[in-house]
Amino acid sequence: MNMLFHIGNYFLMLAKVFGKFTKWSVLKRLIFADIESLIIGSMGIVSFISFFVGGVVAIQTALNLDNPLLPDYLVGYATRQSVILEFAPTFISIIMAGKAGSFITSSIGTMRVTEQIDALEVMGINTYNYLIFPKIVALMLYPFVITFSMFLGIFGGYMACVYGGFSSTAGFIDGIQLDFIPFHITYAFVKTVLFAFILATIPSYHGYHLKGGALSVGKASTTAFVWSSVLIILLNYIITQLLLT
């Protein structure tokens, strides 16, 4: 029953987010601030992880294909498929649930603890729209982060594979181009947009409805990360079943 209560409360929150809108001049400033914090501020960790995990994927693939009868372009092919289909959209989203999600929960939760949200409500502001809507809009740019992650993941695989002596440049590039299906990019971006909505709303829900003192902020951040990750994994399974099978 407690879970049903939170599910219902979550959808009520979404309805209020898109209810009474704050002035555009105010929202614009909040949106740009959230873009800087959630998108631009995440590029460093996303770039680092994407490059080196792409390299690890390529090396492990090459080691498992250590057979002279197997062509070396299979390393590039496997790296491309792994990065585009799962690593960039799903794995990076779970990383973002910890990085951006914790930031959202703690920032809104701190405002709740210090009664700043109550002060905004006294002034007649729709605090759901004021606090949560800019984060949803900012994370709609999340597909650009995933695009960059895809590029760096494949590039990291190329660097590790070619300079590690596992494949030639021509072989790796041939593998990247082999049997490319453009719909896989569409599939990845569909997942990314839905994951972005989860990353914006689940942490916001836990931060907005936080109860208790300062210690509750850390607990809410952990809970938000767990539930965001669970929903990303479940949604990933459902979308894969719907779009790829």
Image (cartoon, helix red, strand yellow):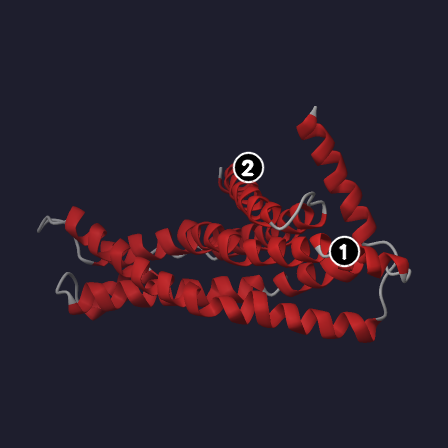
Q: Residue at x 43, y 56 (%)?
A: 88
Which mark is first along the chain, 2 or 1? Answer: 1
Mark 1 to mark 2: distance in Å? Answer: 39 Å
Q: Residue at x 58, y 45 (%)?
A: 224
Taking depth in this image into account, of 230 and 104 the one nearest to the observer is 104
Crowd tier of the residue under label 1, counting other residues whose Cα lies within 10 Å: few below 14, some 14–19, many 20 or above: few
Q: Quadrant of residue 50?
A: bottom left
Residue 39 rendering spot, x and y as whole percentages? 56, 67
Q: Quadrant of residue 206?
A: top right
Local SS, label 2? helix
Kindly identify the amino acid type of the residue bearing the numbered disc 2: Ile
Kindly identify the amino acid type of the residue bearing the numbered disc 1: Glu
Residue farthest left in this picture: 68
Q: Is residue 130 left or right of residue 217?
A: right
Local SS, label 1? loop
Taking depth in this image into account, of 215 and 23 the one nearest to the observer is 215
Quadrant housing the N terminus: top right
Crowd tier of the residue under label 2, counting other residues whose Cα lies within 10 Å: few below 14, some 14–19, many 20 or above: few
> From this viewpoint, is residue 183 visible?
no
Which numbered disc covers residue 115?
1
Which numbered disc covers residue 238?
2
Residue 119 versus residue 14 in the image, above or below: below
